[in-house]
Image: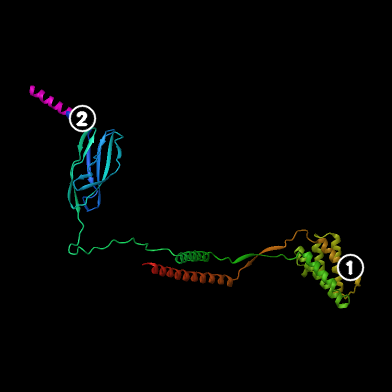
Amino acid sequence: MISFFQRISSIFFLFCGLLPLAAQHVTVESSLDSTAIRVGEQVQLHISVNCKANSRVQFPAYASGYVTPGVEVLEALPIDTISLEDGRKWQLKRSYTLTSFDSAVYKIPQQEIYVNGAIYKSRHEIALKVNTIDVDLKHPDDIKPAKAPIEGVFTWVFLILACCVLLWLLTIGWVIILRQSFIPQPTQKTVKVKAPFPPHRTAMDAMEQLRQHNDHGGEAQKAYFVQLTDILRTYLYERFGFNAKEMTSQEIIDKLAQINDATALRELREILQTADLIKFARYQVSMAESDRALLQAVDYVKTTQSQEVYPEYEERVVAIEERTILRKRRLYVSSLLTLLILALGLFAYICYLIWCILP
C-alpha cells in the first residue's frame, strides 16, 4: 500500500516538475547559408527561436567579435518577429554575417539564447569549412597587377543615333504603305464641278446671239426661225422634261396645255405656227414680225422659267479608270521595295558602325 502511494506521489511530483517546461516549450534552431566558403567570403548564420508570445528573448551579442576563434562576426541584422497560432506564440529570427581569413574547418558551437532569463541552446553544432585560394608557389613573383576600371563597351554617338531614328522612320513608312496597299481601291470617286447654266439662262443667251446675227432675207429668215424654234424646243426639253425636239408643233402645244397658262401658250403657239409656215409654205414675214417673234420667245422663257435656286457647283460620281488603279498599285509595290532596300542597307550600316566602335 505504501509502495503504491509512493509511486503516485512520484508521478505527481514529476508531472508538476515537467509542467513549467511544457508550458514554456522553447525551441532554438541555427543554420548556415553554406557550410563551405573561401577565405574572405561571407556567410549568413541564422538563429530561430520559437517561444510563447510576449517573452523576453536575448540573442547572442558576440562582444568579442567572434562566434568562435577564427570566425569573425561582421554584422548582426535586425530581429524579425513572426506571430504564430493566432498570436499565442512568436517566432524570432536573427541573422549574423560571418567571415574568416584562415583556411580550416571551424565548429560553430550551439547558440545560447535567453528566454525570460532561462538559457536555451540550439540542437546541434555546425561545421564551417573555409577553403584557401590556390597560389602558384612555383612562380611566386608572377603576380598580375590590379586592373584599371573598364570603360563602357559601347558608347552612343550622334551618327548611330541618327541612323537608328532614320531606320525607325523607314520602318514606320513601310508599315503605313503596306497597310494602305491592302485596302481595297475605290472604283468611283466624287468630284465637284461647275454646275451647268439653268435652262432659261441658256435659252436667253442663245436668243441674244440670234438677235445680233439676224438676217431677214429669204433663206436667212427660214434659218432664223429654225434656230429660234430649236432654242425653244431645247428649253422645253430641259425645263419640262419631254422630248420636244422629236415632236410636232401641235404635239408640243397639247403637251403644254396642262402646264402653261393661256397667255404663254398662245404666244408659243403663234411662234411655232409662224415658223411652220416659213419652213414648209415659204411664207415671208416682215422684219417687225420677225422681231416680234423673238420678243415673244423671250417673254415665254421669262414667264415659264423655274424659280428654284441653282447651285454654282455640283457633285458628280465618276468612274476611276482601271489604268489609274493599276498605276497606283505599282506605285505601292515600288515604294515598298525601295523602303525595304533602304532599311536593310541602313541596318547593315548601323551594324558596321557598332562593329567599328567595339574594342
Neighbourhood count class around disc 1 (C-alpha, 10 Å): few under 14, some 14–19, many 20 upward? few
Given the image, on which type of amino acid does mark 1 rest?
Arg
Q: How is the image coloured?
A: rainbow
Which residue carries the number 2 mark? 20
Q: What's the residue at 87%, 72% (across, down)?
A: 277
The location of residue 145, given as percent across then percent down, is 27, 62
For numbered disc 1, what is the local secondary structure? helix
What distance separates the C-alpha of mark 2 from that of mark 1? 142 Å
Residue 293 percent across, percent down from the top left = 87, 68
Query: In the shown orientation, is residue 180 left or right of residue 19?
Result: right
Front-most of residues 253 and 101: 101
Task: Specify whether residue 150 is painted magenta.
Answer: no
Magenta residue span = 1-16
Q: Where's residue 163, x and y in %?
A: 46, 66
Note whether 74 is above or below 344 in the view shown.
above
Q: Residue at x 23, y 36 (%)?
A: 114
Residue on which disc 1 sits: 292
Question: Does residue 239 show up?
Answer: yes
Q: Quadrant of the C terminus?
A: bottom left
**In the picture provided, is 237 more to the left or to the right than 355?**
right
Which quarter of the picture shows residue 30?
top left
Q: Is residue 18 above or below residue 95?
A: above
